[in-house]
Amino acid sequence: MRESDEFAEALLAQLSVEINEEKEISELASKINDDASFNVKFLNIEQICEEIFPKMAQKVNEFIGIKISPHLKLEYSKLNEFKKMKGKKVFAKNDARLFVDELFDAISKESLEKIVTLVKKDTEKYLVYSTYAKSYISKISTTYGDYLDSVIYLNKFILSNYPQIILYKQGTPYEKNFELVNSGYRGALKMTILEEQIHSIQENLFEVNKIAVIEVNSINEELAKIILGLDDEIVAKLSEYLKLDPIPDDFPIAKRANLFFMLNPDNFIVDVRS
């Protein structure tokens, strides 16, 4: 198997727990929809959120003293759309923007072939930005919403399916626990909207952080380029010095990738490889 295929398979394998959980949620949601005995209905997410949004905005204004922008809006994202949106939160210079978007799109579609193409197309960018994919997408099932560019994106896949699943698992009679589950459902939506509204008023901090992250990612791209260009002897000596796990000589890029992840500045702040 070629190294590019190994990299692509390894990335999807690292996301396999999340992917399998998503499939289980979809299958269970489909089963519930087909079960005639499940005769209770929750209001759809759009109805509840349109009611909640202005109330939460007023609470933010009263408590913090800052008005929510009138341009702030809600968007209800399907699973693949939400994953691709997370890619937009990976801040990169213009020459890497398309690569990041293509990578997150490929991952959202579980397209091994496309990921392999991207590894071959630009290995240094793959080393830098695949770490974000692992970090961001592996948390999708516990991420209810996110803010970006005057839009609060709600994870419709999770938020729409969880209340039915929770109630279904509690068993019949479903009416008995409906109010309790429904209250929790509305509470989760309130919490999510309130949290993201607060994020929306931190625009100046967001922009400063964005600029800093873009510069860090540019440095990481340069570091990856340098390491990928090292000759075998230097790679071997550095790997030995850093006590890295040995990798067979048949995988020269993997040897350098291992070195990159160890020398990556992020590794000294937070272990993004986990």
Image: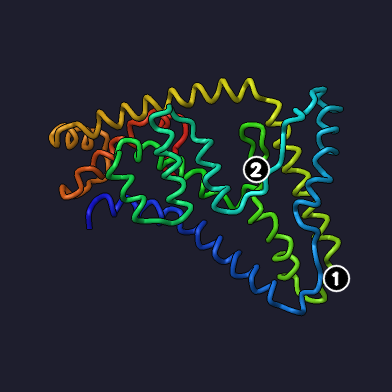
Tell me how the rendering is colored: rainbow
Residue 131 occupies quadrant = top left
- At label 1, which amino acid type do we have? Glu
Residue 128 occupies quadrant = top left
**Mark drawn on residue 133:** none
- For the C terminus, give its image quadrant: top left
Q: Name the residue carrying label 1.
A: 175
Residue 171, position as x, y percentages in the image: 76, 74
- For the N terminus, give its image quadrant: bottom left
Q: Is residue 43 left or right of residue 161?
A: right
Compared with 145, 237 (above or below) is above
Residue 153, position as x, y percentages in the image: 65, 43
* Residue drawn at (34%, 55%) of the image: 113
Compared with 47, 191 (above or below) is above
The residue closer to the viewer here, 96 or 243, is 96
* Residue drawn at (69%, 72%) of the image: 32
- At label 2, which amino acid type do we have? Tyr
Residue 258 occupies quadrant = top left
**CA distance for labels 1 and 2:** 31 Å
Q: Name the residue carrying label 2.
A: 153
What secondary structure is found at the residue carrying circle 1? helix
Q: Residues within 10 Å of mark 1 (few under 14, many from 20)?
A: some
What secondary structure is found at the residue carrying circle 2? strand
Residue 199, position as x, y percentages in the image: 68, 31
* Residue drawn at (36%, 51%) of the image: 114
Nearer the observer: mark 1 or 2; the answer is 2
- In the image, farthest residue toward the bottom: 36
Q: Are marks 1 and 2 in contact (CB under 8 Å)?
A: no
Q: Is residue 70 left or right of residue 22?
A: right
Q: Earlier in the sequence, mark 1 or mark 2?
A: 2
Q: Residues within 10 Å of mark 2 (few under 14, many from 20)?
A: many
